[in-house]
Amino acid sequence: MNFIMSSPPDKPRVPPGPVPDEGQGSVVAERQSAKTQPPPMYQVVMLNDDYTPMEFVVMVLQQFFQRDLEAATQIMLKIHHEGRGVCGVYTKDVAATKVELVLAAARRAGHPLQCIMEAA
Ligand code: TYC
């Protein structure tokens, strides 16, 4: 009978531990000691101006920051009274995308609304 081997046999499994070093003692693979760090976070901050309608800001907060009407109104009023307010905190790419979406929506509607991101 003719047996054809379709793939090489499994390599023998070597248990973890010291790596033999040709009779020179042994080499120990360095252990990874640093744990994975959480990604740096960025807050998206909206700025007040005298021209953007309050309703538009509330709509933006609902549409792009998943706020309900109540929360969106509170954030809008805080911006209106204090000059700026945090819309949300995100990873870098997500924060940058939200800023772009807000600015594009404001531009399209003809409002001067400004939005920035900063390290949280
Ligand atoms: N100050 C604006 C007004 O009185 C309202 C406003 C709120 C504008 C928040 C921008 O980020 C803003 N119409």
Image (cartoon, helix red, strand yellow):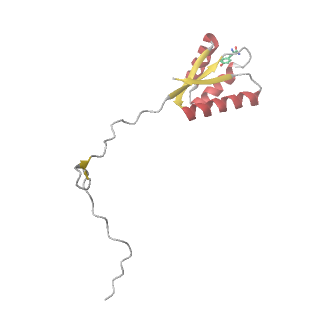
Q: Is residue 26 above or below residue 11?
A: above
Q: In the displayed structure, does residue 118 sit left or right of residue 9?
A: right
> On the rendering, which quadrant does ligand 1 occupy?
top right
Residue 17 visible (yes or no): no
Picture coordinates of residue 5, whole percent (x, y): 36, 77
Q: Nearer the viewer, residue 28 or 86?
A: 28
Q: In the displayed structure, does residue 117 sit left or right of residue 7?
A: right
Q: Nearer the viewer, residue 99 or 67?
A: 99
Q: Is residue 85 above or below residue 21?
A: above
Residue 100 visible (yes or no): yes
Q: What residue lies at 26% left-to-right and 57% top-to-bottom?
A: 14
Q: Nearer the viewer, residue 92 or 67?
A: 92
Single out the residue that lies furthest toward the right. Answer: 110
Picture coordinates of residue 105, whole percent (x, y): 70, 31
- Quadrant of the rendered image containing residue 73: top right
Q: What residue lies at 72% left-to-right and 14% top-to-bottom?
A: 50
Q: What residue lies at 53% left-to-right and 27% top-to-bottom?
A: 42
Task: Indicate the quadrant containing the N terminus: top left, top right, bottom left or bottom right.
Answer: bottom left
Q: What residue lies at 57% left-to-right and 31% top-to-bottom?
A: 95
